[in-house]
Amino acid sequence: MRKLSLIDRVGLFGRAGIDIVSVLGRSTIFLFHALLGRGGIGGGLGLLLKQLHAVGVMSLVIIVVSGVFIGMVLALQGFSILSSYGSEQAVGQMVALTLLRELGPVVTALLFAGRAGSALTAEIGNMKSTEQLSSLEMIGVDPLKYIIAPRLWAGFISLPLLAMIFSVVGIWGGSWVAVDWLGVYDGSYWSNMQNSVTFSGDVVNGIIKSIVFAFVVTWIAVFQGYDCEPTSEGISRATTKTVVYASLAVLGMDFILTALMFGDF
Amino acid sequence: MQNRTMEIGVGLFLLAGILALLLLALRVSGLSPTASTDTYKLYAYFDNIAGLTVRAKVTMAGVTIGKVTAIDLDRDNFTARVTLQVEKDVNNLPTDSTASILTAGLLGEKYIGISVGGDDAVLKDGGTIHDTQSSLVLEDLIGKFLMNTVSKEAK
């Protein structure tokens, strides 16, 4: 490799900056076209239904199973910490607040990025590499409307629902461990929880978080697929990028949202 | 047929999501459908409210009848003015009722307990509870205790 002069290095740095800005611009234009393009979702509810099935229903198993286990682990850990202060009855409150505020939205979004996001990217990327997208355009069908828009909406709808199911199942799993196994009194598990959890504060903020995550994860997944290099290597790179970028975006956004919602400043 | 099972699956998924929201609202956060009852305002002046926060509950005989909506300093008397939001159903509090700041458990949160007086007149919206008992500050208590032992030893 030849030696780079200082000017070349500055040029490379500049090119990287231009690349980043142009990707951001392209993805935003892409999003606006897909969501606000003429006529909304193509193919009516049928295509959306199909995507809701692929993205939402098929993710239920992993969400429910991990929800139960995370709730159970939280109850177990919480019990062993809280019992040294003699306040094991607060375990219900701890499990519920942790799940509703943080783990429900965040873990669901991470699992969703791995389970559904990568599949979306690979599917769209494959359509692109086999020139299905350009053939659709050739016959006068807008791929943004028929391929992209239903997938985006399916992701936006599914993730908040999955996050709520995750929290409920986790709290149920927590009660299973704490009440049925470790012998915390059933009444204090639930009443402590109801005293400390507020609907407008905790439940609604958790839902807002999961809506934001749904938006970010689905957008990244669909755009990476649409923008990928139409080769097998390009698809694999795009799928990796989807999972990495979506996870980083979710964790970063989570900090900002938590600071805004619960930061008290 | 394939299409039909898919539709049923999506329908069940949406139902499960709505059910989860309902469970979160009713079972986990204890939101009751008739939560938004009418309230009226009362004021109470305390010498020291240390540890009392907005949204703390107001109880009577252990039953929650309202919450604290605002705490500010009365600049003229240098006392804390606490605004209480009490449910409309409890509209027969005598004017000489006592409001005291209590603690739930040893290290628990502070709340306001109201004990009834014997007056015939009742508190109206915007009324003031004059008889109050301040928050218990642990440092003051320890200070008093120490002063007591010191003065006993001096005798």
Image (spheres, grey):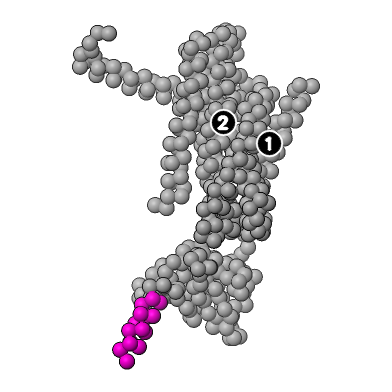
Mark 2 nearby-residue class (10 Å; few <14, some 14–19, many ≥20): many
Asked whether A81 or A25 is in front, the reply is A81
Crowdedness of circle 1 by 10 Å Cα count: few (<14), some, many (20+)?
A: some
The x, y position of residue B11, in whole percent, is 72, 33
Question: The disc numbered 1 marks a residue on which chain?
Answer: B
- Mark 1 falls on what kind of element? helix
Q: Amino acid at mark 2?
A: Phe
The residue singled out by tag 1 in the image is B14
The residue depicted at 59 percent of the width and 86 percent of the height is B118
Residue B124 in picture, x, y percent from top left: 56, 76
Residue A244 falls within the magenta-colored stretch: no
Left or right: B27 as drawn, with respect to B136: right
Q: Residue at x 24, y 19 (%)?
A: A10
Left or right: residue B143 versus residue A92 is: left
**Numbered range of the magenta stretch:** B141-155
Identify which residue, B147 or B27, lies in the foreground: B147
**Amino acid under disc 1:** Leu
The image quadrant where one finds the C terminus of chain B is bottom left
Where disc 2 sits, the SS reads helix
Residue B100 place in picture, x, y as percent = 50, 76
Q: Are marks 1 and 2 on the same chain?
A: no
Residue at the (38%, 76%) spot, across then down? B142
- Whether the residues at callouts 1 and 2 have beta carbons within 8 Å, the answer is no
User: Which label is found at residue A112?
Assistant: 2
Q: Quadrant of the N terminus of chain B?
A: top right
Give the chain of mark 2: A
The single residue placed furthest to the bottom in the displayed view is: B155
